Image (tube, helix red, strand yellow):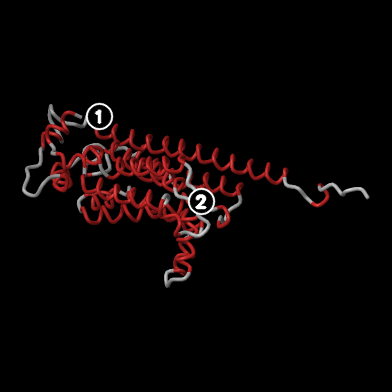
């Protein structure tokens, strides 16, 4: 990491503009769940647990989209894949779990009565969400697409945001943060999680088992210099010594780095989905206990005359 701090400035390493945006989002969230909740119908006190989840989600999003990992991810694909894990497999579920149901209910009701209602209904289907995120994720890792996006700051940022929305749709159906609107039973949600794990596998396999390095971003000095230029102030020289040579930041051979990135993504995806299955199963058991413990008319004792 010393190589990064020596060759890159604070703005490139810490992405202060992202910190400002996330602080604003956090401030809005804490206002809504405290003083602002009086504006929402059926709003109740938000437990500390949810506030911690949302805060950790914002931190995870910063790690995924900013922090020194942003620069490191332009040098080694393992770090780039770590960014994706934090942004789409850690930040999104934490932020969903940290948002109160009454906020989601208010947003859903508002969208239903706008021109976007019909579109919202289509993209909110589990099947659409399933193929949208995994399709976009796989497309992102096609070599031509990856190198093209990495060389365009605007296109790459836009694709990241679209992928974040797709990840939110996908995680919505797995976590069911508003149970009354869930389109899947608990058993089908578990099957849905397995389906997501299967659909993401081809992209990981492509990266792991490719016989040679796939991405020019990490192999071609001219392409790498073009990519790194977006991390530096205008007119600054790109430190080519970071790319190759004795002071290179890349401590793994390029193909090994690529294989590690694919393995890392698959393992982390399996871990997060495993925790999610446990979460769904816990919800399922809780519902069963509530149903078993519910009183029926026959359970109510009739007073003797």
Q: Please give the name of the residue rendered at 48% of the width and 52% of the height, measured from the top-left corner.
A: 172
Q: Tell me if residue 126 comes above or below residue 65 in the rendering.
A: below
Report the residue marked by disc 2. Answer: 44
**Few, some or many C-alpha atoms within 10 Å of disc 2 (few <14, some 14-19, many ≥20)?**
some
Q: Give the image location of residue 277, x and y in percent.
A: 54, 40
Q: Please give the name of the residue rendered at 50% of the width and 57% of the height, measured from the top-left corner.
A: 127
Residue 252 is tagged as 1
Q: Is residue 167 visible?
A: no
Q: CA distance from mark 2 to mark 1?
A: 51 Å
Q: Please give the name of the residue rendered at 31% of the width and 41% of the height, measured from the top-left corner.
A: 83
Q: Earlier in the sequence, mark 2 or mark 1?
A: 2
Foreground: 267 or 281? 281
Q: Residue furthest front?
A: 305
Q: Is residue 294 left or right of residue 204?
A: right
Name which quarter of the figure residue 209 lies in: top left
Residue 298 is tagged as none
Q: Give the image location of residue 55, x and y in percent.
A: 37, 42
Foreground: 46 or 22? 46
Q: Tell me if residue 243 comes above or below residue 133 in the rendering.
A: above
Secondary structure category for the residue under label 1: loop
Q: Is residue 103 visible?
A: yes
Q: Give the image location of residue 288, x and y in percent.
A: 67, 44
Q: Residue furthest bottom?
A: 115
Secondary structure category for the residue under label 2: loop
Tell me if label 2 and label 1 are in contact, CB under 8 Å.
no
Name which quarter of the figure residue 120 lies in: bottom left
Q: Quadrant of the N terminus?
A: top left
Q: Residue furthest right?
A: 305
Q: Give the image location of residue 136, x and y in percent.
A: 37, 53
Q: Is residue 233 left or right of residue 255?
A: left
Name which quarter of the figure residue 74 lies in: top left
């Amino acid at each position: 990491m010393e190589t990064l701090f020596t060759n890159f400035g604070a703005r490139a390493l810490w992405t202060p503009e992202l910190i400002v945006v996330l602080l604003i989002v956090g401030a809005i969230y804490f206002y809504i769940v405290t003083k602002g909740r009086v504006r929402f119908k059926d709003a109740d006190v938000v437990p500390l647990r949810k506030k911690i989840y949302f805060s950790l989600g914002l931190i995870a999003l910063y790690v995924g989209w900013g922090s020194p990992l942003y620069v490191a991810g332009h040098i080694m694909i393992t770090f780039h894949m770590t960014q994706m894990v934090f942004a789409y497999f850690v930040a999104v579920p934490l932020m969903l779990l940290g948002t109160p149901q009454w906020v989601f209910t208010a947003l859903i009701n508002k969208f239903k009565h706008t021109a976007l209602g019909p579109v919202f209904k289509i993209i909110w289907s589990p099947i659409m969400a399933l193929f949208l995120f995994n399709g976009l994720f796989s497309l992102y890792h096609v070599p031509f697409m990856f190198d093209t996006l990495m060389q365009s700051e605007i296109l790459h940022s836009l694709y990241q945001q679209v992928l974040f929305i797709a990840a939110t749709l996908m995680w919505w159906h797995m976590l069911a943060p508003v149970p009354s609107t869930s389109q899947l039973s608990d058993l089908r949600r578990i099957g849905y999680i397995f389906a997501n794990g299967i659909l993401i596998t081809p992209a990981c396999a492509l990266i792991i088992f490719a016989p040679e390095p796939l991405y020019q971003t990490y192999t071609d000095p001219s392409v790498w210099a073009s990519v790194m230029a977006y991390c530096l102030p205008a007119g600054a020289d790109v430190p080519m010594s970071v790319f190759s040579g004795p002071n290179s930041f890349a401590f793994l051979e390029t193909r090994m780095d690529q294989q590690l990135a694919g393995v890392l993504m698959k393992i982390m995806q399996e871990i997060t989905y495993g925790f999610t299955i446990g979460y769904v199963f816990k919800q399922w058991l809780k519902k069963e206990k509530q149903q078993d413990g519910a009183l029926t008319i026959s359970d109510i004792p009739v007073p003797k005359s």
